[in-house]
Image: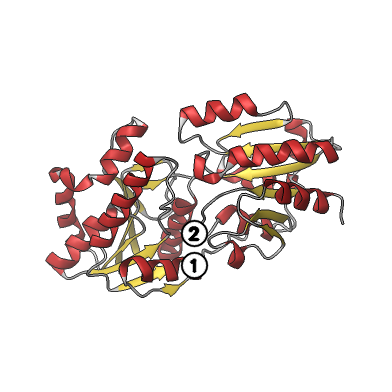
Amino acid sequence: MKISILTPTFNYYSGIDRVVQQQAEEYARKGDKVTVITLEAGIRPKNYRVEVLGMPKNPLMQRLYRLFFFLDFGKMKYYKNLKNYDVAISHFYPMNLLASKARRKFNIKYIYFNHGINLEGDNFIQNIYMKLFSFFTNKTLKNVDEAYSVSNYLKDDLKKVSGLDSKVIYNKIDKRFNRNVKGDKIIKKYGLKNKKVLLYVGRITPHKGIHILLEAFKSIKTEIPNAVLIVAGNPTFDGYFKKLKSIAGKDVIFAGYIDDKDLPSYYAACDIYTTCSLWEGFDLPAAEVQACGKKVVAFDIGSHPEIVKNGILVEKWDVKGFAEAVIRILKNK
């Protein structure tokens, strides 16, 4: 079969994009001809093609461009290229626009993978943006042939906001995330010997609650003086990132973007994985780190009750309870 997989971005630092990568490689191994169609890409393909349509470089312009992608009449004509495929699999708006239009014009099979939309904006403008994003997304789901959600939480949410039924397919965890991975090179790199290492991996953006994690870490330090927190990921908002660095103590390490091949070593190097994320549709790092045998402390939100099986879930916004849970685990109580 000829399969097109559509995703707005195709980069190693995005959980959704790494799911797309796994999907593309799996279809390619089966002998299918696969093309990943995206607006920007950093992942190197293996036995499949990547076609980059392009978008603005400025982060603010990117957000506006993705929201109003349908106004780029030139790019919208790309749907005609999908005529030569048997299936169009779309993982996120605005790429649904192309898959939906190709379904209407050429009757090719349209499959939608639901990774969820966080409607809890950080301010009024963000709230409006996300509501418009959800509205436009729902418009593109009217002619879906098959829909899949990556958690039961998202399955229920999709049905609620769009009326669309979906089947649940959890994200697969790559075999390279396992208990045999060693974290020695990370421990050596940051001088972590005899330290209690807390780790967060993901985008640095307000809804991921890193400012809350830093607040909890201050309390953790009072009981665990040798605790160190590694925050690994790309900043989404420069202002937010500057704020985090201004309130972080000397034992907070901002590791920046981690090369995908090094990610298992970071998981292996930590004593506990910590996230104060306020919304998650799946939380791939939490699943991966558990595959490496590490415990997780997280807020009891979104998909976490399904994903976090080795660790402690704490009530949302409960900074004190979060710190106490981390301390309890680190002290082996």
Residue 144, x across and y down, in percent: 27, 70
Viewer-proximal residue among 65 and 180: 65
The reply to whether residue 151 is in sight is: no
Residue 303, x across and y down, in percent: 54, 63
Q: Look at label 2 and name its amino acid.
A: Gly
From the image, tell me which residue sits under label 2.
281
Q: Is residue 53 above or below residue 310?
A: above
Q: Look at label 1 and name its amino acid.
A: Tyr
The Cα–Cα distance between marks 1 and 2, rounded to whole angstroms, is 7 Å
Q: Which quadrant does the C terminus fall into?
A: bottom right
From the image, tell me which residue sits under label 1.
153
Q: Is disc 2 placed on a helix, strand or loop?
A: loop
Lower sequence index among marks 1 and 2: 1
Residue drawn at x 74%, y 35% is 218
Position of residue 295 in the picture relative to residue 260 (left or right):
right
Image colouring: secondary structure
Q: Quadrant of residue 232?
A: top right
Residue 325, x across and y down, in percent: 76, 53
Q: Which quadrant does the N terminus fall into?
A: bottom left
Residue drawn at x 17%, y 43% is 72
Viewer-proximal residue among 106 and 205: 205
The reply to whether residue 138 is in sight is: yes
Residue drawn at x 72%, y 26% is 250
Viewer-proximal residue among 175 and 256: 256
Residue drawn at x 45%, y 59% is 25
Q: Quadrant of residue 4?
A: bottom left
Q: Which mark is residue 60?
A: none
**Label 2, residues with CA under 10 Å away: few <14, some 14-19, many ≥20:** many
CB under 8 Å between callouts 1 and 2?
Answer: yes
